[in-house]
């Protein structure tokens, strides 16, 4: 069966329309990198745009803000234009700024408006911890008790969320909900359109953490009517460790002043007037706070050039689904009765860009995989995440990774590694 899967992989690789982009990325010979949902690989294009900015900084100094190619002063706005098709929104609703958690703080400060009847923020028990930290700390700043005013939707199976349970939790005391587009552990893709409609029907504002979906899953945030969203760019957007984040604010909220104001959120023509009166820029750009992070914006510009040349998000999604489907097929065929359980939903409409594989020895297996040059990551308590990225991974990568995994468990090689401890990757 393994031989047939290798033949199938080779055939799929030969006809892959995105195959030419693999050469754009720095990868190590013999290594299979399946951790792009934590940190995407460095591309030659991103490397070049960083070097270009450094060269301009050396040559131009402060004049780079106006004389750079492109001028640095408008780089965040230029990138917002390119990001628009990835999230399904016009650029005036996009702000390229900050980091994921800082942007959530800004959005909560701008949109959370508790009343006597609506004072609850709704989240979920499976979301990335930083979202919960931001929500609870924001409630404290507002003089509200998180134990009373933050509610989490529970999971029935510890892996996924049920849409009906989320909707049932949108009770009349909820003012705002924050949910993940894709769950960072299981890779479940939530039904954004339906949940947004149901939230609005109940008078609830709703926003989406797109950190594990942007660049892997097409979004139509504007058409869906989402109130807000936020994301990072170092995963599937391949913009580098700690790269600049982004946020979406639906234009129905543009009349609100920013919850946290700063000088870069002022109208561009008034930014250098140094007036103490804050005159908000038009659209989501008003949520900018400080000077853009140029050295963090530069690699994102380069990485987005590749995505644009690849045809945008549609072909990436097509290949991503094909890769994860093939990876699950290989796991089913080569790892039966080995204690592994695929916890990612099988249905394409419910699946993000990675496959989550549960096993009691997940930590040890992850370390063993690294020793044979397969790079996964671990999420407590028992999940191995495998993320084949459509721009640089192949179908042969998928089957070869599973073959190496099978060899490890057949020989009990993973047991040579010390059992579980938590790690951040």
Image: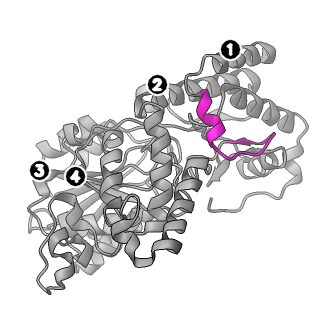
Distance of label 2 from label 1 (alpha carbons): 24 Å
Q: Position of residue 404 (x, y in %)?
A: 81, 34
**Does dot 4 land on a helix, a strand or a loop?**
helix
Of the image marks 4 and 3, the number of the one nearer the N terminus = 4
- Residue at 8 percent across and 61 percent down: it is 255
- Residue at 64 percent across and 28 percent down: it is 327
Q: Position of residue 104 (x, y in %)?
A: 33, 64
Q: Position of residue 189 (x, y in %)?
A: 41, 37
What residue did someone put label 3 on?
Answer: 203
Magenta segment: does it hold 20? Answer: yes
Of the image marks 3 and 2, the number of the one nearer the N terminus = 3
Distance of label 1 from label 3 (alpha carbons): 51 Å
Distance of label 4 from label 3 (alpha carbons): 21 Å
Quadrant housing residue 127 = bottom left
Relative placement, left or right, of 220 versus 205 is: right
Labelled disc at residue 93? 4
């Amino acid at each position: 069966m393994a031989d047939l899967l290798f033949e199938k992989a080779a055939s799929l690789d030969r006809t892959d329309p995105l195959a030419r982009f693999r050469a754009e990325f720095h990868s190590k010979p013999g290594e299979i990198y399946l951790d792009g949902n934590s940190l995407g690989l460095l591309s030659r294009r991103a490397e070049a745009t960083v070097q270009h900015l450094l060269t301009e900084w050396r040559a131009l100094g402060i004049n780079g803000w106006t004389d750079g190619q492109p001028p640095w002063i408008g780089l965040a706005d230029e990138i917002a234009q390119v990001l628009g098709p990835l999230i399904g929104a016009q650029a005036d609703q996009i702000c390229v700024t900050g980091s994921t958690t800082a942007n959530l703080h800004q959005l909560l400060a701008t949109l959370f408006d508790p009343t006597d009847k609506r004072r609850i923020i709704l989240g979920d028990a499976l979301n990335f911890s930083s979202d919960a930290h931001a929500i609870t700390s924001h409630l404290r700043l507002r003089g509200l008790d998180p134990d009373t005013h933050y509610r989490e939707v529970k999971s029935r199976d510890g892996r996924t969320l049920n849409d009906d349970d989320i909707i049932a939790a949108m009770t009349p005391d909820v003012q705002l909900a924050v949910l993940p587009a894709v769950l960072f552990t299981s890779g479940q893709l939530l039904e954004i359109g339906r949940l947004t409609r149901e939230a609005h029907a109940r008078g609830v504002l709703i926003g989406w953490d797109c950190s594990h979906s942007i660049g892997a899953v097409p979004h139509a945030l504007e058409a869906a009517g989402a109130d807000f969203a936020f994301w990072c760019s170092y995963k599937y957007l391949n913009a580098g460790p700690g790269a600049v984040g982004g946020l979406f604010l639906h234009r129905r909220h543009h009349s609100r002043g920013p919850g946290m104001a700063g000088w870069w959120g002022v109208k561009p023509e008034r930014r250098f007037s140094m007036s103490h009166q804050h005159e908000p820029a038009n659209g989501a750009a008003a949520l900018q706070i400080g000077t853009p992070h140029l050295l963090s914006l530069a690699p994102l510009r380069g990485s987005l050039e590749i995505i644009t040349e690849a045809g945008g998000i549609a072909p990436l999604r097509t290949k991503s689904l094909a890769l994860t489907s093939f990876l699950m097929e290989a796991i089913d065929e080569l790892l039966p009765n080995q204690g592994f359980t695929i916890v990612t939903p099988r249905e394409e409409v419910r699946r993000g860009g990675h496959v989550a594989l549960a096993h009691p020895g997940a930590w040890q297996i992850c370390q063993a995989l690294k020793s044979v040059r397969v790079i996964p990551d671990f999420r407590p308590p028992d999940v191995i995440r495998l993320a084949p990225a459509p721009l640089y991974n192949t179908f042969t990568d998928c089957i070869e990774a599973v073959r190496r995994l099978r060899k490890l468990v057949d020989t009990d090689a993973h047991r040579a590694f010390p059992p579980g401890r938590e790690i951040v990757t």
